[in-house]
Image: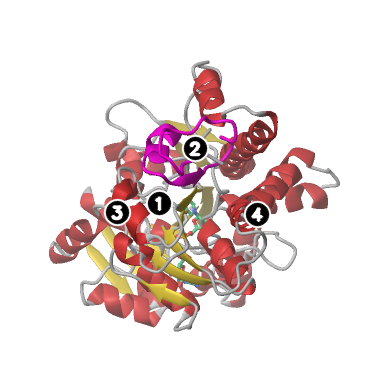
Amino acid sequence: MRVTIFGTGYVGLVSGTCLAETGNQVVCVDVDAARIGRLNRGEVPIFEPGLEPMVARNREAGRLRFTTDVGEGVAHGLFQIVAVGTPPDEDGSADLKYVLTVARSIGEHMEDYKIIVDKSTVPVGTADRVRAEISAALEQRNAALEFDVVSNPEFLAEGNAVDDFMKPDRIIIGTDNPRTTELLKTLYEPYNRNHDRVIAMDIRSAELTKYAANAMLATKISFMNELANLAERCGADIENVRIGIGSDPRIGYQFIYPGAGYGGSCFPKDVQALARSATKLGYQADILDAVEKVNMRQKRVLFEKIRAHFDGNLSGKTFALWGLAFKPNTDDMREASSRVLMETLWEAGARVRAYDPEAMDETRRIYGERADLELCDHPEQALQGAHALVIVTEWREFRSPDFAKIRELLLEPVVFDGRNLYDPALIGRFGLTYYAIGRGASVSGGGEQSKVA
Ligand SMILES: NC(=O)c1ccc[n+]([C@@H]2O[C@H](COP(=O)([O-])OP(=O)(O)OC[C@H]3O[C@@H](n4cnc5c(N)ncnc54)[C@H](O)[C@@H]3O)[C@@H](O)[C@H]2O)c1
């Protein structure tokens, strides 16, 4: 089938490539000429496991093309998939300017029937606005052409995006026209062979389903972080509590890890956007407001622990940071907890030596050259001359570090762990003071100077 994708970010590029992989003819359109230039030179501008060879394979096979030419894109596909960004505007609502720009371009260029598939995360009612935008553009041209608008939210998770797209848990199709449901089912057939994963519904419910899913996951995280803060104050260990409650199948083990707050391009903005939508509808969404508030507080938890340990005196101190991406297996740093930590440390006069397996270029792009930030090629290099180690992202390579080496290289034997990666008793045996999240009551191991704080 012929597919056009607007936007070659995390969603657009993965979706386009995976659709080409199953034999479709895909054209990806982006307004970012530099990005399209890189893609046409065979470079993949984002880090996503498994994506690069798949892009190369499908480009070579002639099934995947990249262009900035909107007219070419609109002419190509029966399906016009919209996967552009929907960032928060000033009040936290989803900013639809990119989505509506694409809609207008489609209306300006289309010459035959099109199915506009909205994959971007958008508030309820957006399909109507997309439809109106296209109709207005068609009217200006005096063109009476048929089109349908479908809501098809994307649930892939960065870091596992290719697998998520190829083997989705569900494919939500929101339509008001049974014919488009059938056409989309055909498009998604190759990802649907094991059992039927298509869930067809009305457009508004499909739009809300995406926000509901992200808000539910964010709620689980904020809930656990709230409990972690409580555990610290009442002498419990949140890791025991986590295992205790996860064993209940109604709760489950997924997404109940306490930590230094959630980040990324989706949860923060989607929780906010849903709460703002609620307000506009005259409803006060108290749970969503609390989820957001708890998360903002949680992103400062590592800084507060560091400040307390060093008696408020951080000026001139240096901190080794392991992990900058908002989560492992991505180079995405949007809303990352590492950014809040670095920025608060800098404000307090401290310096940062940081290491991340994939997000170093992104860090350079965001912060440029600065005297209080040194990006290191190796985790151990970051430890040299640092007063403490801070774990911010739970990359696999941080799970079993050489604790003796950490102890030897740090100026002070202190580890702040924002992801609860280590066994407090084990790390204690190496003489390291260990601060984790919600584990205040843990008993230290045997090392002479060790204590678990
Ligand atoms: N990132 C995720 O994990 C994820 C998962 C599910 C859903 N989503 C949603 O999908 C959407 C896209 O997210 P993303 O992370 O891929 O965004 P992104 O910022 O990585 O990419 C968006 C791309 O769209 C391009 N663009 C902007 N205006 C354009 C236009 N008029 N025509 C063509 N291209 C244009 C930008 O240049 C950019 O390359 C958002 O609504 C997001 O909420 C994201």
Which disc number belongs to residue 158?
A: 1
Which disc number belongs to residue 405?
A: 3
- Label whose residue precedes the other's in the sequence (3 or 1): 1
137 above or below 435?
A: below
Q: Mark 4: few, some, or many residues within 10 Å (few <14, many ≥20)?
A: few
Q: Mark 1: few, some, or many residues within 10 Å (few <14, many ≥20)?
A: many
Percent x, y of residue 284 = 83, 43
Quarter assignment of residue 88: bottom right
Percent x, y of residue 211 = 61, 44
Q: Mark 3: few, some, or many residues within 10 Å (few <14, many ≥20)?
A: few
Tag 2 residue: 178
Percent x, y of residue 250 = 55, 18
Alpha carbons under labels 3 and 1: distance apart: 32 Å
Examine the rendering and report whether any part of residue 28 can be seen: yes
Q: Nearer the viewer, residue 182 or 328?
A: 328
213 sits left or right of 272 in the view: left
Q: Nearer the viewer, residue 297 or 215?
A: 297
347 sits left or right of 178 in the view: right
- Label whose residue precedes the other's in the sequence (4 or 1): 1
Q: How many marks?
A: 4
Amino acid type shown at disc 1? Glu
Query: What segment is highlighted magenta in the picture?
Result: 422-451
Tag 4 residue: 308
Which secondary structure lies at badge 1? loop
